[in-house]
Image (spheres, grey):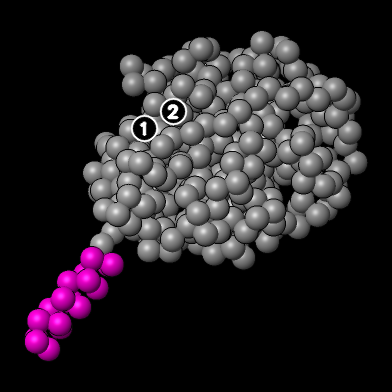
Amino acid sequence: MKKIFALVLVFVLALSALPALAQGGLGSPENPIEVYFVPSGEAATIVEGGQVLADALNAATGLTFEVLVPTSYAATIEAMCAAPDRTMGFIPAAGYVIANNRCGVEVSAAAVRNGWPVYWAEYIVRRDSDIYTFGDLDGKTWGYSDPGSTSGYIVPAVEFNEAGITPGAEVQTGGHNQTVLAVYNGEVDFGTVYYSPPMMPEGHAPWSTKDLLEPYDLTVDESHVTPEGDLFVGDIKVMDARRTAAGTAPDIIDQVRILAITTAIPNDTLSFGPEFPQELRDQIVQALIDLSADTEAWNQTALGEAYSWTGLDPIGDEAYDIVRNQIAFLGRSEEDILGG
């Protein structure tokens, strides 16, 4: 009898230890994990690449994911705070800091782009513009993606404040690619978007912060877009935000130049709602790290295609203190930044 009781007990314990998805819990088809992407580029491209990522994660973990792209950074944060036990999001540094402060959203990993754990914002102008110095931006019309964007708005706003520069009219474009096109079309005098270093050709040293922001000569090196949609100048691959507009404006490099870049910014995050199960977090992070090792498959996902991530590394909340300090320096509330 004792032996039978022990076997029954083992069976009951085994049932209780079944994965949540087998019990209709989080990650099951009936209760998918909600995956949020901020609208920093073309929504259709993000959704398509996001679904590729969701399918790959499903194959690796058996979990089911639902891809969502809200209309703003604020809406992304609100959605994650409203569902703290079933949401994960790929959100930039400032958005993470605000979400963490608002409802305890927690970072688990950060993007790596071609070996860089940081990125920058770039100030862009038309090549025929008479803006040549940082000070020339004073009074000029400023285009940016979203007030919650770290590179699009937060960091440039801090640098303007520190330098005593007051832009003129401000135009919220809705995305980095839209900002690039607004500059291209002359709708704004300058724009602020993300800067990721160019990828140098094989045999050349990788780009460093001592190099030119545009390490090519347009009088010699021709810019072109490959059939795969990659933007090159000669044999140098452009990775900054101008690449997002190349499909619409193939001559974007010929028409839009980089004026300057900002101080370094911690890379975008993979964050989870504060009540998201730790075991599933660890499983998802490891699956993403493993997936990033398969370059061909990774580049078809939203992280590889739309966001230019080449991998991700685990990271702690303290890495984003510099962004907290920048937001505090601005002296603006979360509502001011997010427009809510």
Res. 226 mark: none
Q: Main secondary structure of the magenta part?
A: helix
* Mark 1 nearby-residue class (10 Å; few <14, some 14–19, many ≥20): many
User: In the figure, is residue 197 to the left or right of 131?
Assistant: left
Q: Is residue 16 visible?
A: yes
Question: Could you tell me which quadrant the N terminus lies in?
Answer: bottom left
Q: Is residue 294 visible?
A: no
Residue positioned 70% across, 28% down in the render: 144
- The span shown in magenta is 1-17
Which of the 4 image quadrants contains residue 206? top left
268, 52: nearer the viewer: 52
Rendered location of residue 47, percent (x, y): 44, 28
Rendered location of residue 249, percent (x, y): 53, 12
How far separated are the C-alphas under marks 2 and 1? 6 Å
Residue at disc 2, secondary structure: helix
* Mark 2 nearby-residue class (10 Å; few <14, some 14–19, many ≥20): many
Rendered location of residue 155, percent (x, y): 72, 44
Which of the 4 image quadrants contains residue 130? top right
Inspect the magenta stretch and tell me whether residue 105 lies in it. Answer: no
User: In the figure, is residue 106 to the left or right of 24?
Assistant: right
Res. 51 mark: 1
User: In the figure, is residue 26 to the left or right of 40?
Assistant: left
Residue positioned 87% across, 25% down in the render: 168
Residue positioned 27% across, 67% down in the render: 17
Inspect the magenta stretch and tell me whether residue 8 lies in it. Answer: yes
Query: In this figure, which residue is indicated by the disc labeled 2?
Result: 47
Rendered location of residue 16, percent (x, y): 28, 67
179, 239: nearer the viewer: 179
Which of the 4 image quadrants contains residue 319? bottom right
Question: Could you tell me which quadrant the C terminus lies in?
Answer: top right
**CB of mark 2 within 8 Å of CB of mark 1?**
yes
Q: Kindly identify the amino acid type of the residue bearing the numbered disc 2.
A: Val
